[in-house]
Image: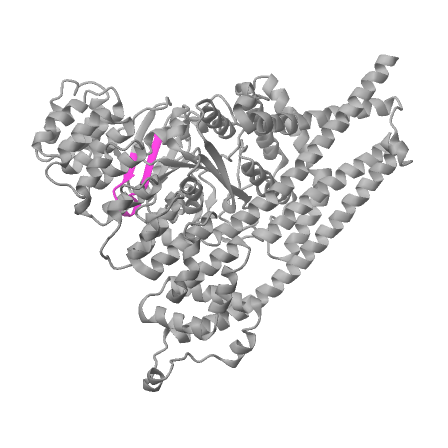
Amino acid sequence: MLFQYFNLSGVHFLIGITIIFCGFIILLISFIAISIFILNKRELNYYNWKELADDLITIAIFFEPDELDLLNKPAVEISPKVQKLLPNKYFRKILTNQLLSAKENMIGSSGDNLELLYNQLGLEVFALKKIKSKSWHKIANGIKELGLMNLKKYRMEVEPFLNYRRTLIRIEAQNTMLKFNGFQGLRFLDTATNPITEWHQLKLLEELAQLPPDDFTGIENWLNSTNDSVVLFALKLVRNYHLFQFHQQLLQLFSHQNESIRLHAIGAIKEIPNETTANHLIALYPKETLKNKLEILAALKDLAMEEEIPFIVSCLDDDFTDIKFAAASSLYYLKPNGFKYVLTHLDADKEPLISIIKHFKSDIK
Amino acid sequence: MIWLRLLYDLVTYGLLCYSLFLLTGYICIGIFSIGEINKYLQKNSFTNYRMLASSNDIPGISILAPAYNEGANIIENVRSLLSIHYNNLEVIIINDGSKDDSIDKLMVAYDLEKLDYFVNQKIDTKKIRGIYKSKNSIYRKLIVVDKENGGKADALNVGINVSKNEYVVCIDVDCIIEQDALLKLIKPFLENTRERVIATGGVVRIANGCEIANGRLIKVGLPHDFLPRVQTLEYIRAFLLGRMAWSRLNALMLISGAFGAFDKEIVIECGGYNHKTVGEDMELVVRMRRYMEEHDLPYKVAFIPDPLCWTEAPASYKILGRQRNRWTRGTIETLKFHKVIFLNTTYGVLGVLGYPYWFFFELLAPLVEFTGIIIFVFLALFGAINWPYFLALLVCVYTFGVLYSIFAILMEVLSYNQYRRGKDILNLMLTAFLEPIFFHPFVVWAAVKGNIDYLQKKSSWGEMTRTGLSQPKKT
């Protein structure tokens, strides 16, 4: 009907479609050719310009201001070639990326010199422009740049993004605050309503690992946060930095409804034990899930004393083989007598205990 | 003769509708993939993987690499796996009853000793003959399992039982893995808070033509031979466009057996790999998805477009035919095992989109195409072909096929641009024009043979002889 309306036959219609397809093929091939041409040209420039940027960065890294510089404003010597190329957007992108990448791996005076160079080149203007852009990845890039270059004076520009709806922007803003303020930069956790992903938590922990340990303030609030991911992150801080003062709060988390929080609380309390910890873990054990029971037995491997042996031995009677293995493992590390209880267990001549005993006798780590 | 006319119209219009649906599907896949790749690339530019490679807080991964008669390259392959950047890692090589000297070579090269290693048999498998670890602490990440032959699925299940970590990465031992591949693969598991990521797949690329030394990829190159080259194009199309689009819709049903990461807890809950199918990779993903849907648990199967794994493609029609035959049988078996999902809204997008797509356009497409050819021959013999119409349709379908491939090449150039030389891209484009004529008919025939073999209850894996990747080929 449609064909008749337009006075077309099926063949004409198909030819028409084929011509359109052919047109698209020609268009795409042209686009590929142009893209390759541009990419190759850029690549050619890239290596030359990257070399220029690297040379400049090397000069900056080894820059030592003399007395005159110290009296005035210290400045890295910038070649006329670089100055001429600076208005070029693509060169500036290469230079900025190289600077940021070098800064990520530098601390101390070399890092300070890179900040000096960044400021001297006036690159912060472009970072601020990015922050005001409408494109989410440009905003995130701008924030990252300010953070890496330690431009604390722009703290107010970054703060509005701390609870931003776009995850990546939010993450970069939070990382930047950490760079600006050290451990104090974690105060965004006080009001964080969005989940802090495990990946972001890893990034934060790695960032923190590069800072000198400081007074931790706020953790007591984060451990009570209604945002479960904040609680999990706080538990990781307690674990990694052995923050003994939070022992009591961790015990309270044993009754948290989130299984993962209880799991991490068990893992963290293992790192800050006192003489009652093992008893608390044993008291928690019957109420726990299989996964958390295994975590408790793993914790007891480090914490248990002679008094806890009867409880661990009773776990050898559990129906789950994983529990039997974890209990045997705890007893194996409870020197000097722990493993004797496995060897003399009533089921020691039955599977799976036979194989478990062999495993530990092989001293497999 | 009315019924004959009716049948003729039914077949003609049926095929037309089918083709239109198929073309629309491809167009949608193309469009979806653009946004997804773009989003991934922009997002990924913020990640400093190097910083996280040495992290102690990163979750543990166990690499599971089954090996069967891989003695020729096993030492290099294991060395390559041990050199991957990841702090919390164990590498488990499962020797699946090889008839060659694989295990002896491994014992000597890595100073292995047999241990009374306890394995909790959470998934039933064939008997383990022995578990070995190295006396040399440099190789402390390595565990070698020697077991009775039971096939790839069984070997992977043994690896799952032996593994200690919460994530398992299943790979083909002869694959070349990028150094930061595991960090990229683990990321989706850790950055989703709304749903649980149960599996992540990465792009598999063709290594024929690449320069490889000591189990590492030195330089990317396009294969010189036609068959591997056409598969390069096919893989770009399938991974960069197809799987990215399906991932965006959260309807991905297949993660390549050559390289994929899984949440071990869910894998065990589902009973591990099914050794009753030759498509164990797809079957596991579908079963895991089904498990999550049936337990009403929010989940995602993620996919990342980075080229992380390089594999050797079959270079002869004989080996390629066996591979495609096996893939077809695997697809039939998987779809049959899980037929309850078909158009079942209880399974969400999997039931109404993912499964039907696989059924209609992956499983049935070669059969429809083959039937079409037979009908065409029949009609041609009786002079019932409208030749101008036929030729116009043929050229139209051909140009669409080429257009789709060229689009895939453009996406490759704009995203990862692995084949940097203009000559390579030109060759790929030429391949796009040749593929529908010289390659596609063979693939259709291999799929039809796969259907026939399935009906004849053939369940062999089919020997996959490889020439090896370590020696650079002479041009």
Span shown in magenta = B132-146
- Is residue B322 shown to the viewer in this render? yes
Q: Quadrant of residue B236?
A: top right
Residue extending farthest right: A7
| Towards the viewer: A237 or B313 | A237
Is B428 situated left or right of A127 in this image? right
Indicate the position of residue B450 as horizontal and vertical percent values: 61, 25
* Above or below, comparing residue B170 to residue B308 in the picture: above
Question: Please, is residue B161 above or below residue B91 in the view?
Answer: above
Of residue A190 and residue B421, the one placed in the foreground of this image is A190
| x 24%, y 19%: residue | A319
The location of residue B408, given as percent across then percent down, is 64, 45
> Colour scheme in the image?
one colour
Please tell me in which quadrant of the rendered image residue B96 appears.
top left
Q: Is residue B391 left or right of residue A46?
A: right
- Depth check: A30 or B172 in front? A30
- Residue at horizontal 32 percent and vertical 48 percent from the top: A190
Can you give x and y, in whole percent of width and height, for residue B30 in the image?
64, 42
User: Which quadrant of the structure image shows residue A321?
Assistant: top left
Count of numbered circles on the image: 0
In the rendered view of the protein, which quadrant contains the N terminus of chain B?
top right
Residue B358 lies in the magenta stretch: no
Residue A311 on image: x %, y %: 14, 26
Q: Is residue B113 visible?
A: no
For the point 83% across and 41% down, which residue is it? A16
From the viewer's perspective, is B45 left or right of B417?
Answer: left
Rendered residue at 45%/73% (across/down): A55
Q: Residue furthest bottom?
A: A68
